[in-house]
Amino acid sequence: MQPEQVIWQGYGRADGSIGIRNKVLVVYTVECAHFVAEQIVRQAADSETELVGFAGCTDNQYAVRLLLALIRHPNVGAVLAVGLGCEYTQPERLAEAARQAGRPASWFFIQDMGGTASSIAHGVDCVRWLRAQLRDTPRVPMRLRDLVVGAECGGSDYTSGLAGNVAVGRFYDHLVAHGGTAVFEEIVEAVGLVDLLAGRAANEQARREIVYTYHKAMDYCKSVRQYSVSPGNFAGGLSTIEEKSMGAVVKSGSQPIEGVIKVGQRPPHTGLWLLDSTPDPHWMQFGITNPNDNEGLMDLIAAGCHLTILVTGRGNVVGSAVAPVIKVTGNSRTFRRMQGDMDFDAGPVLTGAETPQALGLRLADKVIAVASGEQTCSEALGHKEYCIPYKYQDKQVGATPRCEQEC
């Protein structure tokens, strides 16, 4: 049976979305509440109860939008928001947003509960109540066309552009051709390729968004005097950011690019989309684009991706909260050495043992298996990392920074 013909059962949500997991999400709204929220998740002893949070006490709209996107994510069935009591981000507002999206939700302040021990005990009771609400979550049929899939690189080597990203690109072409949605990011790893990307724009608006986003990213890299290339990339056989970029863009496949979305936004319709996670100009100049792989994965998941694909030539062990992470490597040596952490070996395409087209279809089978409930390596090992930093980003592509508007 072809991948596009396979049907599996997802989790129906009141807002009409369909998830591939049925999670209780515990959200802390300041670092002072981190320990309590973490202990709630640990003592709840439920593999589908997960933790995310934002450390900052002061306002950051990027982080707030990201948290709102996560609590409305299709894989999230219920939400518990935990705050200290004096931070900017309000847990009550998060819980209310979850309820408006049809998710059972609860919240509390640690200060009101009387401190650490009583807050943990109360939080565990809340999680058990929320989990009970999810027992009767309706199961509804899903197909490949219902999926939103995100992809990024992490720990790239010379095989990433020749095999790992080739697998993702061919899968993306298949996914989009059959009505699904694909999201790729890392515009800072597209150095010198603006004409290639703009030439794939689905329309004139998309072309303008791509060109603007590219030049904004290049200006950003120049301003911080840093490009997205590391000593590990050099050790893995990549010589320059330009060479790394040529391999990185391969994961986007060949379908038309429908447009650019910002962090916390879902694609307006199906097709292939570019996610811009680069900070926008701001007088404080704070925020780093993809400070680590989990920040990039969170950005993709906040776009509504049911699952993500992490392409890693040198090897990576991380997973993520909210959505499964399928780790793909184009380096068969890495796959053998880290078999307990790697999900998919794209290396056979380098030896001629497998064609790129067959590679993409095999990855489609893996995606469907995970969407159907099969655990990824990171899920089985308990990897549930996340990263939500301070960052400044406008809601719209090409928006005028607020400081310029007010001046």
Image: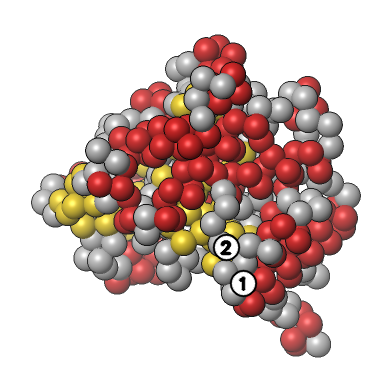
User: Residue 120: image x %, image y %?
Assistant: 34, 42
Q: Residue at x 55, y 12 (%)?
A: 337
In the rendered image of this protein, does residue 317 appear above or below residue 338? Answer: below
Task: Please identify the residue farthest to the left as the structure is shown.
Answer: 136
User: Residue 210: image x %, image y %?
Assistant: 68, 66
In the rendered image of this protein, does residue 362 appear above or below residue 275? Answer: above
The chosen color scheme is secondary structure
Q: Residue at x 74, y 44 (%)?
A: 245
User: Residue 144: image x %, image y %?
Assistant: 32, 50
- In the rendered view of the protein, which quadrant contains the C terminus? bottom right
Q: Residue at x 30, y 35 (%)?
A: 369
Quickly name the residue at label 1: 206
- In the rendered view of the protein, which quadrant contains the N terminus? top left
Q: Residues within 10 Å of mark 1 (few under 14, many from 20)?
A: many
Q: Is residue 167 left or right of residue 269?
A: right
> Amino acid type of disc 1?
Ala
Q: Residue at x 76, y 54 (%)?
A: 193
Inspect this view and state whether residue 15 appears.
yes
Q: Residues within 10 Å of mark 2 (few under 14, many from 20)?
A: many
Inspect this view and state whether residue 36 appears.
no
Quickly name the residue at label 2: 257
Q: Is residue 390 left or right of residue 308?
A: right
Q: Nearer the viewer, residue 230 or 52?
A: 230
> Amino acid type of disc 2?
Ile
Residue 50, by quadrant, is top left
User: Residue 395: image x %, image y %?
Assistant: 59, 73
Q: Secondary structure at mark 1?
A: helix
Alpha carbon of mark 2 to alpha carbon of mark 1: how far? 7 Å
| Labels 2 & 1 near each other (Cβ < 8 A) | yes
Q: Secondary structure at mark 2?
A: strand
In the rendered image of this protein, does residue 61 appear above or below residue 295? Answer: below
